Image (tube, helix red, strand yellow):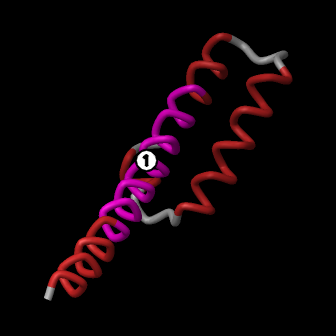
Amino acid sequence: MSEADTAGLGYEQARDQLVEVVKELEAGGLSLEQSLELWEKGEQLAKVCERHLEGARERIEAALASVETDDAE
């Protein structure tokens, strides 16, 4: 799975797919190549989740800053 494949995923979709990747890896029974591919897919999905969470964090900080500005006036 490339970064282009994961770019359009929402947070919940990426998180759910990441959970499935972890389950597959934990279940074992995969070849080294299959495990590496899943690991790489998981890394991409984790990055998508991080980007969504960072965006949410920025929105919260902006909202808080706006409230603080309004309170200061």
Q: Residue at x 64, y 43 (%)?
A: 18
Image label count: 1
Q: Residue at x 84, y 16 (%)?
A: 29
Q: Is residue 68 above or below residue 28?
A: below
Where residue 59 sits, quadrant-wise, is bottom left
Which residue is nearer to you in this view: 70 or 39?
A: 70
Which residue is at a point 71% across and 32% down the rendered structure image?
22
Q: Is residue 63 left or right of residue 2?
A: left
Give x and y (percent) for residue 39: 57, 26
Which is more toward the observer, 57 or 43? 57
| Residue at the outermost left position | 73
Measured as percent of width and height from the top left, residue 58 is found at: 30, 63
Q: Residues within 10 Å of mark 1 (few under 14, many from 20)?
A: few
Which sits in the foreground, 25 or 51?
Answer: 51
Q: Split into 4 quadrants, where in the image is the C terminus? A: bottom left
Tag 1 residue: 50
Kind of residue at badge 1: Glu
- In the rendered image, residue 4 lying in the magenta stretch gets the answer no
Q: Quadrant of residue 8?
A: bottom left
Main SS of residues in magenta: helix
Left or right of residue 49: residue 60: left
Q: Is residue 48 above or below residue 23?
A: below
Give left or right: position of 37 versus 73. Answer: right
Q: Is residue 60 above or below residue 22?
A: below
The residue lying at 82 percent from left, 17 percent from top is 28
- Magenta segment range? 39-60
Q: Residue 31's spot in the image, x, y percent?
A: 72, 13
Q: Is residue 43 above or below residue 14?
A: above
